[in-house]
Image: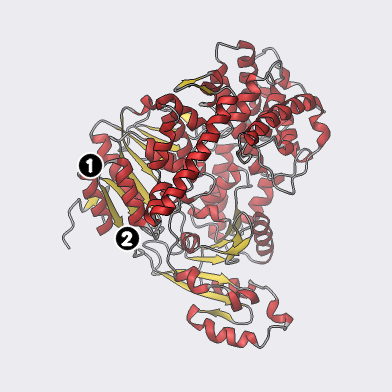
Amino acid sequence: MMVNGPTMFKGFTLSTFQREAAAALDTDHNVLVAAPTGAGKTLVAEYAIHLTQKKGMRALYTAPIKALSNQKFRDFSADPEIASVGLSTGDITLNSSGRVLVMTTEILRNTLVEDAGQLSDVGVVVFDEVHFMDDPDRGSVWEETLMFLPKNVIVVALSATIDNLGQFAAWLERVRERPVTVVEETKRPVPLKHFLYHPKAGIFPPSRLKPVRARFKEHKKDREYKVRDDGPLLDELIKDKRLPILYFCFSRRLCESKARKVSRSRHLTSSEEMTKFAVQWEAGRMEFGFDDTRGPMASLRGMLERGVGFHHAGMLPLQKEMVERLFATGLVKLLYTTETFALGINMPARAVIFDSLSKFDGIDFDYMRTRDYMQMAGRAGRLGMDDEGLVYSVLEMDDVMDAPIHRIQAGRVEPITSRFHLDYATLVHLHGLAGRDYAAQVWENSFAAFQAREHSTKREEHNRQQMRAILAKRFLFLEEMGYIRGDKEILARGRTCLHLFGYEIQLTELLYEGVFEDIEPAALCGLIAGVIHEGRRRDEYWANALRPMRGTLRHAKRVIDFAIQREVDAGLAASIKQIDEAMSPAIYEYAQGRPFEELERFTNAAPGDFVRVARMTVQYLRHLQKIVGDSHPQLAQITTTAIECLYRGPIDVRAELGLDGPKPPPRQEESAAVPEETAAPERRPRRRCEKRRD
């Protein structure tokens, strides 16, 4: 088949699917690219950005997670052909007028609602990992964004392989009102070879599962067959030089415990690599100014210099950054990690190991989806270095007997299912545009309605009636709460909630019911954190730390309880989250000036989780600061001070992005987490949140 399009781009010889996508972009088509992990989808995105720049237009690049957005920002910033790059993730906004702007999808959706005029010069939007539209919690944001984006904007959607690619493309073409070229690549640039492992069977291919099962059937009650031991597997892979290895575990604690255990018994780096490690580690220490003589960085270094590490969302961003750098340069040979490492971050390995084929799906433990398995397995095999990627699954006795191995490894990849729902802020926005009937029209254009339509007329009508009934109740709630009125009128509360997506009802009510009046900056930080935090079952904290803000918390809970009750009274299931104060003591103390390393007294949450909640708190404080502006100068000043109190140390994302420049490492008696303000030479009035606490 004759394929048009360029054969070369940026010094790379384009593959057939890349040329097909480029040819479609040359004719101003929208493009949907589905290809395996590591096949080169990003080059299609870069070609689209290249075309857009030639037209004098801007390009947006959206990603599902902030870590991926940060990585793309670094990548594009290093590209000499891109004039200027910006970043907007909520954690930080840099050069928002950049010719290429990297952002999370939530930020783009919010921009479309708050001020779509900001996008008037945007020519293309890249949706990386667009199959994330299937995510139960956040998928609707992707769907809304694809629907609300101006029709003149070209869409480049990059996806893993999905079963209903044609259905998704047909909906996309309908809702975007522009031809969509579907480009599907099923061949991996580095093929995968799959293996299974059990200590009583050794390493064996899936084709031998049937005889292994037959043999294990005779040992169902044999305790030795129920012992879990992956040591021999690691020994064999290390002996055969099948490093580096990504070892996927679905538990942060398991990642850490396995890495520590292995690092005590195995040394995977040569003396030459140890020297290289020391140079790279010292460069990072000078760049970020951390103390590695004690604490978490010291213990992490001891492990990493032996070639073993771990990586998960509970780690400090600085720790993850050092692990990623060392893995990318081949100095970490065995990395235990959770599945987030497979989401977009381009760091392949020679081999991948699955600690388990079952994982928690939010409700119960179940065997993995084929799509999830293939996304993680796809990290095996380095282009230009390996002839094949090696994938090993560690099985327990029950897995040998019952696991759907063939379905997981070679089954049909699951389809994208719509998660569409219109949150309250979006409904307020739609009401202001064209009245409440417009929301029903928006639903008619959704992928949810499109999928229902393809099933049957009866199902379509049932879904339509159900959705109209729910929308009517949600509009009733908004009207009774004073957010909207009449045909198209948006009231003050409604205008405010448009800037507080995610927790729009809670924060709007707290503002209008006076909960933020005369509040101290640290207490404001703790209260906002309570609104956004969704804790784990094992959360523990020192309750006495909340004593200074107990009255504020009680007031806030009464206000939110009232909103929840009104929602129920409108005939809706309660969807408004009540305050979860588990992280509030630590946030409050940190905003009071307490050093980061002393926060263990106030929360048992992982450091990375604290950083995530603190950064989200800063994000919503900035929204609040923008809302009150000149209308409430006292609260505006409190909010400004609260941001300054909280946005320091590991919460400040600038160092993570290399924007602060090299910093001298701290002296041993100092902490790297102590805020810069305490060491500033200039004299200035002390803010209330800066008081010393013993």
Taking depth in this image into account, of 198 and 653 the one nearest to the observer is 198
Q: Secondary structure at mark 1?
A: loop
* Residue 70 position (above or below residue 18): above
* Amino acid at the residue labelled 1: Asp
Q: Pointer 1: what residue?
A: 28
The location of residue 272, given as percent across then percent down, is 53, 59
* Residue 419 position (above or below residue 106): below
Q: Quadrant of residue 378?
A: bottom left
Q: Is residue 347 among what the camera can see? A: yes
- In the current view of this chain or complex, which residue is farthest to the left? 2
* Residue 303 position (above or below residue 109): below
Of the image marks 1 and 2, the number of the one nearer the N terminus: 1
Q: Secondary structure at mark 2?
A: loop
At label 2, counting other C-alpha atoms closer than 10 Å, the crowd grade (few under 14, some 14-19, many 20 or more) is some
The location of residue 638, given as percent across then percent down, is 65, 17
Taking depth in this image into account, of 236 and 291 the one nearest to the observer is 236
